[in-house]
Amino acid sequence: MNEPKIACRNLWKLYGADPEGFLRRHGGKPAIEAIRAEGYIPAVRDVSFDVMPGEILVVMGLSGSGKSTLLRCLSRLIEPTAGEVMFEGRNMLAATESELIELRRHKMGMVFQNFALLPHRTVLDNVAFPLQVRGTSRQERESRAREVIELVGLKGREAYYPRELSGGQQQRVGIARSLAVGPELWFLDEPFSALDPLIRKEMQDEFLRLQKVLNKTIVFITHDFDEAIRVADRIAIMRDGAVEQLGTAEELVTRPATPYVAKFTQNIPRDRLLSVRSAMVPAAPRKAAKNAICVDDLLASVARQVVTSESPVDVVDGEGMLVGTLDRAAYIDTLYEQEPTR
Amino acid sequence: MSAVALDRPVKVDEATILGKATRPALVILPFLILFLAAPSLPGWMTTVPKAWAIPFIDWTNTLIDHLREDMMFGLFSFRDLTRWVADLITWPLALVEGLLVSGFPDVGVPAMPWVMTAGLFGVLGWFLRDWRLGALAAAGVAYMAVFGKWELSMITLSVVLVAAPIAGMIGFLAGILAVKKPWFEAAIVPILNVLQSLPHFSYLIPIAVFIGVGHKAGAIATVIFAIPPMARLTILGLKGVAEEIREAGRMAGCTRFQMLWMVEVPAARQALLVGVNQVIMQCLAMVVIASFVGARGLGHDLLFRLQSLKIGQALESGVAIVLMAIVLDQLSRAAAEKQPSHAKTSGIWIARFPFLSAGIAVVGISLFLAAITPYASVWPAELTLSTAPLWDGLVDWVMLYFFDPLQYFRDAMLLYVLIPVRSLFQQIPWTAMLALVAMAGWMLGGLRLAAIVSGFVLFIAFAGFWERSLITAYMVAVAVVLCILIGLPIGIWASKTERRAEMAKLWCDTFQTFPSFIYLIPVIMLFKVGDVAAIAAIIIYAMIPIIRYTVFGLRNVPQHIVEAGITSGCTKRQLLWNIRMPLAFPEIMLGINQTIMFALFMVIIAAFIGTKDIGQEIFRALTFNDAGKGLVLGLCVAFMGLTADKLITAWSAERKSRLGLA
Ligand SMILES: Nc1ncnc2c1ncn2[C@@H]1O[C@H](COP(=O)(O)OP(=O)(O)OP(=O)(O)O)[C@@H](O)[C@H]1O
Ligand SMILES: [Mg+2]
């Protein structure tokens, strides 16, 4: 039960003349300077993490930081230079081609940044494609395709060709296609980056709604922190192929592991990300005041109450037990990144 | 500030001046020295000594004889094999020809009535683009019936309809194999390069040797000639499929087979259909020329009339060929451009399948018409129109009013341009040429390129046809220079507005579809035979690419650079010469490259009107069925083209990357 859906250990991907030999010569853990000095491109460096069933892991980083490469190593669209990838505890890298095909036909789905729809197929045929590939009968695959098309809100467009659809609609087709086989593990590589901001917001909502129904295990790539915060359970920040820090959004903002992560997260609207928990001061148990706030409330939602109150506001947990207090000064310090003066 | 990209360095240090000047100097100097010193050079340095000639031709002929006579596969010989394979084509050929013209007398089924053929072409055009293309296609077919070219044109059409799918299929499969197996690609791409620069006639000679002459041999030559472009476009198309689409296929769990046939090939559909268009047009061009080995049809008709100098009648046949080229090109082009769009899923059958319904209606109606009137099945001879008198009139008129000026022009051209240039070319020592080419290769692409292009020149020199090759080179050079002098200004003029550019593109597209042989007709009409006529034919044909690339290059200069020029106050003229021209120049050079290729193709065909170059020798080889000579000479021509091609592409690529355009 508590086995990770997908996990990787010390995953490496270098581009260059002889990456395997290079890694071996450097004892498997070359420093970034050594990699650069010998003209190799560090796409993925020593990445390890677990993704639990039902979890959404967001991978973030600037362009060229190796996000797509990492994702493609996980799905084995490209071969890692070194390391392990485990799917449900099985070693993915030892899988034969036919095992891989089986895995992809039944357990994995992927959504691409530029949609990657097949231009010669209608919406229906695009969505039914993975089913057709695995040999499902026409009737069955079409009825299943219609189901997912309806799920992503494209009913009525089944007979259209991709070029007759808008970008947002095309990406819905991409999503529907990746869902058609009912995958347990869902890879999304910057699925909404090619869309304009309004549509992107709409698609994110759509995605969250879907995930509520489907509850898949997801690895989601983006370079947009707002998007990451909206969808992520945990976020991994990548730089030059290495994961700098992996944790919840709140952890990244409040306890950045490196200056890079701190810089990366400094412009986040903290009041919409942080909860009362990260700003409050623990208090000795006593009876809570009537107007107490909940420890999981976002800072933004209690702003008025805390800022207008002369005295610290009581904070209670889910059961109504007092766990701490929050005063104006601590509230403002947390929002504006000052070390709280306790 | 805005014209950063255009800044010339104000301070030029000596090293760069030297660097800039030395490169061209290094290329030109050895050539000049050898050229000027020619009279005092030892003989072996100026002309290739006879004793040095390598008997490529004998070797090739020995090989061919061996293949032809001795090579046995158990019970049958190689020649039996080739003939047997060639016989395979007679079946589909007979079938299509039977359908279109001759009918099937054995089973008592007549050919399709001409109204049916015209109607079906019309429906096809309507389906592929719109009713106007449909009308064009139907009218094109009807023209053949009404103007008495029915039988000839349908025979030509059947060769195209049979050869194109076979060539397309073979090229397609070869292309797939090349994409999937790197070793095959490494082997086939250089071969494709040579094959695509071999003159048409070089294909005909081995065919004549192995298969014989006749209609069937012509069809086979057509098939073989049309394979390379399809293979090349298949490779290009499959490689052009976006990596992401391929990944989508893999993530869906495609096997390799599914990947190829369900993802890659359909996704490359457009490029493949462009290949089909090329194949069809190459087939038509070749089937016209294949009349030299006895292919029947319009080409044969044209050849016969040209040989007997019946210009008016030749023009009539030429018009029919041109019309057929336009219709076939437009139809296959429309097929490539056609994008799928969603179909109606409800409504009555006719509304859901309008084209199928129309096709069935055409068949029904024409069968009915054919039953009530014979005019619908075969256009009556007494109603046949002929345009020949019209063309004859035109020819007479031209002769009447232009004979003297043309004569004068021709003589002046010969006396003051062609003969001096020719004798100049004939004085070039072969070592000078070799030095020029090798140095250029070295400067542009290092030792590797130098070795390749020198190899080409050495082959030509030692094959024993150096003098003939120089004559070919002189004709091509004169023609190309004239093409640039005429074509560049036209291209510049046409690039001025969007409308003109569109027009120029349309004209270029149209003229390029005409089989090259056609261009001989007006030229013979104006200049009779000889060098002037040949060069005129080359110029008309080879002008197309230079115009096309000039327009394309000038119109595709990045807009922001042009705007930078405007804001720094350039006049229109400065804009053209200081900004557009330098940036478009690499593209224009590619146009010149194409022009050279076209010129080489045409110069060989022009042998038909009496030139004294390699083409003439190839022609002779054709008459004497000397396959070895034909092939070696063909290779000489191909290597001339490839030398120019390699050097110019290297230059253009370097220049483009330096300008940041690549
Ligand atoms: N096939 C390849 N050959 C050489 N280098 C490559 C190749 N594919 C990727 N790289 C390099 O690996 C690095 C990581 O690329 P990757 O595509 O994973 O970045 P990314 O984080 O997904 O960026 P983006 O946000 O732009 O998609 C980049 O420096 C890239 O240039
Ligand atoms: Mg990426």
Image (cartoon, coloured by chain):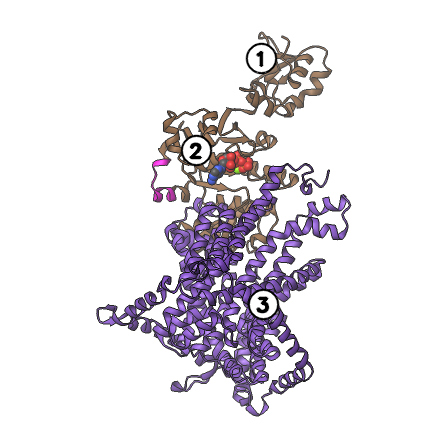
Q: Is residue B111 one of those drawn in magenta?
A: no
Q: Is residue B274 above or below residue B515?
A: above
SS label for mark 2 = strand
Q: Quadrant of the N terminus of chain B?
A: top right
Label 2 crowding class (10 Å Cα cut-off): few <14, some 14-19, many 20+? many
- Of residues B16 and A134, the one drawn nearer to the viewer in this rendering: B16
Q: CA distance from mark 1 to mark 3?
A: 105 Å
Q: CA distance from mark 3 to mark 2?
A: 66 Å
Kind of residue indicated by mark 3 = Pro
SS label for mark 3 = helix
The chain assigned the colour purple in the figure is: B
Q: Quadrant of residue B627?
A: bottom left
Label 3 crowding class (10 Å Cα cut-off): few <14, some 14-19, many 20+? few
Q: Is residue B208 above or below residue B390?
A: above
Q: Quadrant of residue B313?
A: bottom right
Kind of residue indicated by mark 2 = Lys
> How many numbered dots are placed on residues in this image?
3
Mark 2 and mark 1 in contact? Answer it, CB < 8 Å. Answer: no
Q: Which residue is mark 1?
A: A323
Q: Is residue A100 one of those drawn in magenta?
A: yes
Give percent across and percent down for residue B186.
Answer: 40, 52
Q: Chain of mark 1?
A: A
Q: Is residue B360 above or below residue A277?
A: below
Q: Colour of chain A?
A: brown
The residue at 64%/41% (across/down) is: A196
Q: Which residue is mark 2?
A: A13
